[in-house]
Amino acid sequence: MAEAQRRRTFAIISHPDAGKTTLTEKFLLYGGALGTEAGSVKGKKGGRSATSDWMELEQQRGISITSTVLQFPYRDHIINLLDTPGHRDFSEDTYRVLAAADAAVMVLDAAKGIEPQTLKLFEVCRDREIPILTFINKWDRPSLMPLEILDDIEKQLSLTPTPLSWPVGSSEGFRGVLDQRTGDFVRFTRTARGATMAPEEIVEPERAIEEEGGLYEEAVDELGLLEAVGNEYDEETFLAGVTTPVFFGSALTNFGVRLLLDAVVDLTPPPTPKNDHEDEPRRLDAPFSGFVFKVQANMDKAHRDRTAFFRVCSGKFERGMVVTHENSGKPLATKYAHTAFGTDRETLDEAWPGDIVGLVNANDVRIGDTLWQDEHVRFPAIPSFAPQHFAIARTKDSSRFKQFRNGVSQLDEEGVVQVLRDRDIGDQAPILAAVGPMQFEVAVHRLENEFGAPVELSMTNYSVARLTNEESMAELRAMQGVDVLARSDGTLLALFESPYWLDRLIGEKPNLMLDKLVAGAI
């Protein structure tokens, strides 16, 4: 229980280009995980690349495509940071990651506020019912007014913002922030490219008025206005997801990063009991249990491995212990257990509730699986999103069909795309289903570069999918513009070219099973 209290497991979400990956790097810098200089992870050609954006395509495109697990110490706590994809097409991966998180940090661009992708990712957070801290980034650049951003958060997210830091000045005149928790004015100085921790100067109010003049007084007046209308931090409403503490700063130049990281430790909750499939909480001090939320292949290109990441939910995990794989009922050895830091791995000997563990080459483990020891438990499965884009995949080189088949299966296991198969055709021409079209780009790139299987995709006219069953399949497949395909777990999906035809069928043939996917309404 004491070790669980030291854990903080949180995810970072944002719109592309809001600065999420930069903020992740600076958290690692302040936690001492990058030595003394951010961005110190070197690429093969000598260039710098983000610790969290390790995949080749991520470095080419400059956006986060896959979620990443990073663990580091800070203030006698263990921080488990889950960096999520930065594009709405990967909201399904974000949903899975949030299943393993106790809180989230939402990063907003100071010049743009709430953007469409931000809204999509926030809805994923709301569905998971996790508390959110908000970081207004890039405050040293031209930006919206601070009160305007708070109004945007409240109107679009139905979330009451409660500032715990407030900017003094903006853009090139950004002088620092008022720390609401201490009452101090924290003045920052720039560092070269933001590569080192920014020196912070604590300035007393009397001296701040004298040295900063109108900028300081204006910031104090704005905070007073917010307090007068009730925008004050409250722990109960924060943990209930009703309010969001707000921080201002600049990840690139390290303005406000320490205050935010301190708030992660002080405000976000430690691990709590996770409910099992019968909605009963699993005690933190119960025997070991965990659930798998991510599977990733080829993180180590030299070994072509496959890593299953699970969150410890209860008890103590010890490397080498034999656990039960709930889905198969078989014992599972844990000799190759690692803690993750981007692509870097280090053998892990023990872990506690809230920690993330990677099992290398646990080939039978899938996303959503439960692992346990001594005391049986099964955690709820992680729902799949309803795909909206569908493409037929074929190998360009028949001699590489084995690699194509293995690659497609691996991408399916990782959740990069959902793979649908016609039972009469099998793996010859599977249909790849995705929430957004960028997932197809990632699938093609990985099939060609990691599995040596060049592919061609042919887009279909299908636009909507529904769950169906064996009894409905024959009648549905006899209709034009409809097909029924199977996922790897045996679930049948009915694909429709026309949503209007689907709506009509639901009304005219109530005997047919045409259910929405659980998470598809998000």
Image (tube, rainbow, N blue to C red):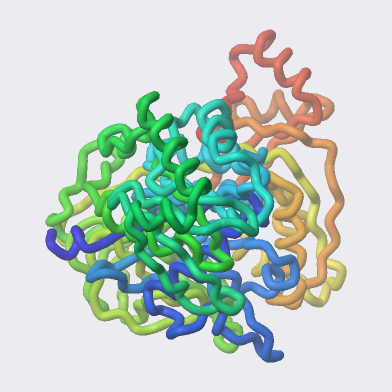
Q: Residue at x 68, y 85 (%)?
A: 47
Whether residue 426 is situated above or below residue 3 in the rendered picture: above
Q: Which residue is drawn at 65% across and 40% down?
A: 115
Whether residue 298 is situated above or below residue 63 in the rendered picture: below
Q: In this view, does 31 lie to the left or right of 406?
A: left
* Residue 129 in view (yes/no): yes
Question: Residue 78's quadrant in the figure?
Answer: bottom left
* Residue 242 in view (yes/no): no
Q: In this view, does 460 lie to the left or right of 160?
A: right
Question: Residue 493's quadrant in the figure?
Answer: top right
Q: Which residue is drawn at 46% across and 48% down?
A: 216
- Which one is nearer the viewer's eye here, 213 or 182? 213
Q: Which percent across, then down, holds residue 412?
A: 60, 57
Q: Which percent across, then down, holds residue 113?
A: 62, 41
Whether residue 280 is situated above or below residue 154 in the rendered picture: below
Q: Which percent across, then down, holds residue 198?
A: 47, 72
